[in-house]
Image (spheres, rainbow, N blue to C red):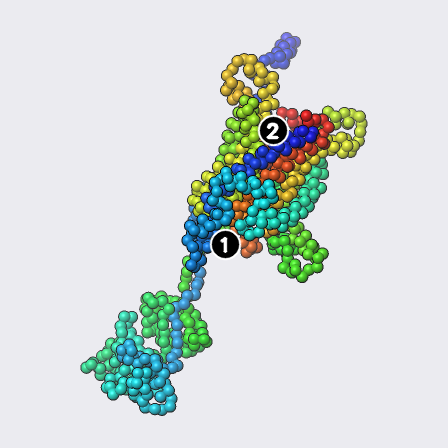
Amino acid sequence: MNDNMENKDQKAQAEYSLNDDRRVRTLSPGALVVRRFLRNRVAVTGLIILIIMFLFSFVGGSITPYREDQLFYRTTQQKKQYAAVKENTEFRYVTATKDSFPSVAQAKFVIARKTGKPSFEGKKGTTYTYEEIGEDFCVIYGDGMEEPVAFATYDTVSSVTSDGEVSFNLQCEILEALAAGEDGFTLGGVEYTVAEDGSVYKGTEEVAYASRFIVQAIMNDVFLTRAFKEELVTSIQDGNMDFVFTDEDGTEAEYTVSYDAASKSYAVMQTVETKIFDTYASPSKEHWLGTDRNGMDMLTRLMYGGRVSLYIGFIVVIIETVLGVILGGLSGYCGGWVDGLIMRIVDVFYCVPSMPIIIILGAAMDAMRMDPQIRMFYLMLILGFLGWPSVARLVRGQILSLREQEFMTAAEATGIRASRRIFRHLIPNVIPQLIVTMTMSLGSTIITEATLSFLGLGVKFPFASWGNIINDVNDTYVLTNFWFIWIPAGICLLATVLAFNLVGDGLRDAFDPKMKR
Amino acid sequence: MRKYIIKRLLQSVFLLVLVAFIIYVLMRCLPTSYLEEVARQKSMQPGSKSFEEWMQQLSATYGMDKGIIQGFLGWCGRALRGDFGDSWKWTVPVVDKFKDAVWISFIMGGIAFLLEIIIAIPLGIIAATKQYSKTDYTITIVALACFSLPTFFFASLLKLLFSVRLGWFDLGGLIGRNYEQLSAAGQIADKAHHLVLPIITLVVINIGYLMRYTRTNMLEVLNADYIRTARAKGLSERKVIYHHAFRNTLIPLVTMLGASLPGLFSGALITETLYSIPGIGYVSYQSMVSGDIPFSMFYLVFLAILTLLGNLISDILYAVVDPRVRIA
């Protein structure tokens, strides 16, 4: 019984106790706002998207293995002109000295040989005689001279070494021996032997060779070895259009031969591995979103582009908010002529069409070839400077209505300083509206910047921004074939701006104490 | 009322002169200009005068050798007589080029404007009447998404889908390849066909704002006391919304729409540029990028006039539509 009484007593005590655990939980206005915001599912989604975009841009940029402006290469098989081969089907003339047998005389020689005359006249009345040693080799003598002035031949004589030269007399003797079917001759007291395939030996050492085919390298610094020439010629004679040659070092190279009917010669192309920029590569393991026009990794560009877009957004919004709060605050608080002046300035700014002005300034900066980094700062300043009037109007309107409210009269009655009245009592009441506007204008600034960059008047290469990444789409070929170049950037842009707007919207609702939910 | 309008008009003219002066100074201060470009090209030609001589001659021809104030006064004087000079880029009088280009912009903007009204206002009202429902969330998110959509990205998507994949429309331009061979009706149809994608772009980009504006104002009206009274009288929900609430929402709506009417003449700079529609927006974009001072000057001042006109219309409409507003 007694126990029961005690129990009841305790119960009653618990009911009326003022211990901490019995207190009604109160929340600060800030906490209430946070609560209301977190209850709004759409706004929280926006916040999550924003966090993801921030992580993507700022952390992603540090994690990615590539640099912002790192170029990638790929190797491809490119065919390069390497050599030309021509089978000699008419006489080539080799002269003893430079002018000893001019071209007029050469033409006369052909006529004389066709008509079977043993001698012919040159240009200056010089008479030449010729001796036909073989079907395709003639030695031409000047007027009554012992030594030949020139010879006409189908075959050419080349030295075995790259820098060696074969003298006129030696060439003449070699060809004579070949034409006459002899296997050797003596010149200047040295004995030479001539093999049937055209090789010429001085003793046992090979010095020169004669051939019907003229093989010339396209590049001056390339020396074609005899082995290469011979194999090439054999290959061409066999009718093969592909040709593989292994040189002395054992390096194998592939060549393609094509016949050019106009010049009656064969062009030899060497297939070489060449390094080129890896442009517009499809998404792969190394490049998850492929590479862009310059051969840079798209995903990395996207991350750094996000950084630039967000930086610009924040800096511009900070500039316009600071200017707007100061000027709007002054205007609202002071009233009178200050208000009139500032509001007229605001009117003027409202009237000045901002997008065309930015375009004109952008074009001017283009013409000045301004450094991309400095240009980016100017862009931020211009955007911020053109954006403050709306903030100023908002702040002024708020302050005008707040100024007339009772709490301001009370604040004035307590006799606190004007600056304290402004910063402790007026400004905090403007802040909710300001935050909402700032969030929303972050989104619109990012769009403006992206539009400018898209037009090529905003952020410039080498810096990436989401706008100038999409810029590539101006090329219809990219629009059609390379979705991975522009769609991810567009989605990032859309998601970020949408998220800013959702959060701004959610904040507006959360700050509104009249909200029912 | 008349006094008010006159006062506002005078204020606007004063503002306009100020804005025109700012724009003029800006254009004159641009470090590089079309003149230098032309002079450079001309001096490159064989046997030509030097760059400096060309520069002098050109600036005299184009009236750029006077001081800024003098030049501005001269410009104002000529502008009052309707003479805005000759465009440097198009080599025709500025006003002629403007007349050529402005109508296509107006038609495009007008159709888009009507479509926006037809689509956005009903959706905004539905969203407001069903606040916090699934419909409201959907409409709000769609509105915000339209609002957040970068024009150039959306236009590229449309081009990829309708022009490249489906092949229904051309990628850009106002007239097709065989425009000259078409009959008069066919030519109009051809132009209309080319305007479909730009108009869709304009509608989608602008619709979000109007939808949200309608919703916000409708919500405000729905919270008013007279709506509670109307409901208390036992009126049907239909009647409450369409007779009492919507009519009051019309006040801000009509004001806003009236204010944006002059904007129909300003052209859609980005959209026209993206689709190469030779309207006033695209033409002035090209002029501005190539440093054509007379045309850019004209276009910027024209835009300023449109803005001022919009403000004026909105103020007057506010007084006309809302009987509570009395203007002294």
Expressed as whole percent of the image width and height from the top left, the position of residue B313 reads 67, 35
- Locate residue A63 relative to residue B181 in the image: left or right: left
Residues beneath discs 1 and 2 located on the same chain: yes
- Identified by mark 2, the residue type is Ala
User: How many C-alpha atoms fall within 10 Å of the one at disc 1: few (<14), some, or many (≥20)?
Assistant: many
Between A108 and A441, the residue placed more toward the observer is A108
- Locate residue A287 relative to residue A204 in the image: left or right: right
Query: Residue at 38% across / 79% down in the picture?
Result: A88
Location of residue A413 by image quarter: top right
Q: Earlier in the sequence, mark 1 or mark 2?
A: 1
- Locate residue A426 relative to residue A133 in the image: left or right: right
- Residue under label 1, please give it: A280
Whether residue A179 is visible here, answered yes or no, is no
- Residue under label 2, please give it: A510
Between A408 and A306, the residue placed more toward the observer is A408
Whether residue B305 is visible here, answered yes or no, is yes
